[in-house]
Amino acid sequence: MSITIQVGLWASTERRTGRHCAFSLHAHLIFVTKFRHQVSTDRHLKRCEESMRAVRDDFEMELSEFNGEAQHAHIPVNFPPNVEPSKLVNSLKGVSSRRLRQECPDLVQHYWRENKLWSGSHFAGSVSGAPLSIVKQYIKNQNRPDPCRGRGQQSRSVPMTEVRAG
């Protein structure tokens, strides 16, 4: 039995595969420095990116980009479904904080009280190929199987490319 999945607007996003699944899980992470100190320089951000990229193999994640300013960093990631986002965040923050504190003694003076680079909080937003309103309309417009038609004979579902925001 073959199953065809119509993904419509998601067709352009790169899907990854595991042993028993196909997935495209993306999140936009934002980390803020402890006490919102404006201490990160370009050198710090480059080293931070390098240390976060070193974590990617442990979680089989992809770090597509990295950018930031003096008090925060933006990290878009693609990760498999077996990875808990909170554990990924903790590892990214922990490894980057430890390496930056070891290699950049100029940062230590800002964090002597708690010996942490990042604030305990973070932002994690899901990222997908379509706005939520389009996804809801797509789901609403799915044709349920007609119980009178029998097994395996379903009505045609509407591809997301035909769904219009209302």
Image (cartoon, helix red, strand yellow):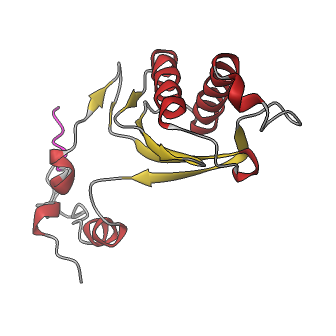
Q: Residue furthest bottom?
A: 166
Q: Is residue 132 visible?
A: yes
Percent coordinates x, y for residue 24 in the rendering:
33, 39
Residue 141 horizontal side relative to residue 82, left or right: left
What residue is rendered at 34% in x and 29% in y?
Answer: 21
Percent coordinates x, y for residue 42 in the rendering:
47, 36
What residue is rendered at 69% in x and 17% in y?
Answer: 102
What residue is rendered at 56% in x and 47% in y?
Answer: 70
What's the magenta bit mostly, secondary-structure-wise? Answer: loop
Percent coordinates x, y for residue 134 in the rendering:
27, 69
Number of labels in the image equals 0
Q: Is residue 146 above or below residue 120?
A: below
Q: Is residue 8 magenta?
A: no
Q: Is residue 157 visible?
A: no
What residue is rendered at 39% in x and 41% in y?
Answer: 25
Residue 141 horizontal side relative to residue 116, left or right: left
In the picture, the quarter occupied by the C terminus is bottom left
Quadrant for residue 103, please give it.
top right
Q: Which residue lies furthest to the front in this view?
A: 106
In the picture, the quarter occupied by the N terminus is top left
Residue 122 horizontal side relative to residue 6, left or right: right
Q: Which of 91 and 100 is in front in this view?
A: 100
Q: Which of 82 and 109 is in front in this view?
A: 109
Q: Tell me which segment is drawn in magenta.
A: 1-6
